[in-house]
Amino acid sequence: MATSAEVVAPSGEEESAETPAALKREERLRKFRELHFKRNEARKLNHQEVVEEDKRLKLPSNWEAKKARLEYELVVDQKKKECAERGEDYNRVKLLEISAEDAERWERKKKKRNPDPGFSGYAEAQLRQYQRLTRQIKPDMDNYERQREECGEDFHPTSNSLIHGTHVPSKESIDRMVDDVEKQIEKRSKYSRRRAYNDDADIDYINERNAKFNKKAERFYGKYTAEIKQNLERGTAV
């Protein structure tokens, strides 16, 4: 007959044998729960990104620029209120915050700009051409000094000087003038002007828009309808 010690001994061996398997199972379950949690987190983040992307796509194309502009205007309004409360001039405070490098960069950008408002008058067009030509002038100090030595006191003429008409321009100066004139002629040739009205042309329109349409139709279909038009004019159309 087995003793109590012999009966208990096998149960202890079984517990020691099951412990590593239980630990491995718990470890696998823990990793599975972590993966499940990470998958849910990734799904949640992906859904949020999809919603945000859908919102961005539904916004206007220039929404970011408008938003930045509105935020900037709010900041400016807030600074203006603060300056008004302190009794300061906002423009002066703003200039104090601008660095020398930014000021120089803005000044260079301002000089590069050449707005073309179109033809508004002959005086404005002449002034713009004068400014364009003066910007192209590159001082030649060697030639300046040479002319100064040749002319002597007459280099700065007075009412008694007879230097007028004695200057002969260099070949480079003449070539530069010719190139500029040719560029002006080429530019003028590209201008569009209002076509003159022809009194002898047939009136087959009721307004200018209809006249343009008739010209386009004649250009594309005129050769096909020439015989029909001639028959209508002669009264021999069938």
Image (cartoon, rainbow, N blue to C red):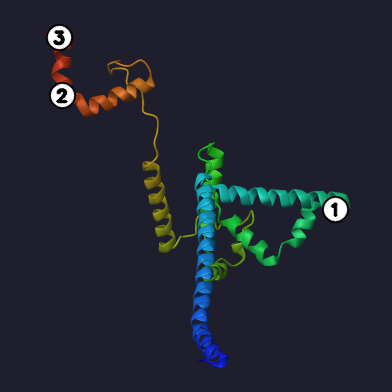
> Looking at the picture, which amino acid does disc 1 mark?
Glu
Coordinates of residue 93 in the picture (x, y in percent): 79, 57
Examine the rendering and report whether any part of residue 87 can be seen.
no
Indicate which disc, 2 or 1, sits on the residue closer to the N terminus. 1
**Mark 3: few/some/many CA within 10 Å (<14, 14-19, 20+):** few
What residue is at 54 percent from the left and 58 percent from the top? 44
Q: Secondary structure at mark 3?
A: helix
Q: Is residue 76 left or right of residue 10?
A: right
> Looking at the picture, which amino acid does disc 3 mark?
Arg
Coordinates of residue 65 in the picture (x, y in percent): 58, 50
What residue is at 43 percent from the left and 55 percent from the top? 177
What residue is at 55 percent from the left and 88 percent from the top? 8
Q: Nearer the viewer, mark 3 or mark 1?
A: 1
The image quadrant of residue 211 is: top left
Q: Secondary structure at mark 2?
A: helix
- The Cα–Cα distance between marks 3 and 2, rounded to whole angstroms, is 18 Å
* Residue hosting label 1: 88
* Residue hosting label 3: 234
Q: Secondary structure at mark 1?
A: loop
Coordinates of residue 58 in the picture (x, y in percent): 51, 44
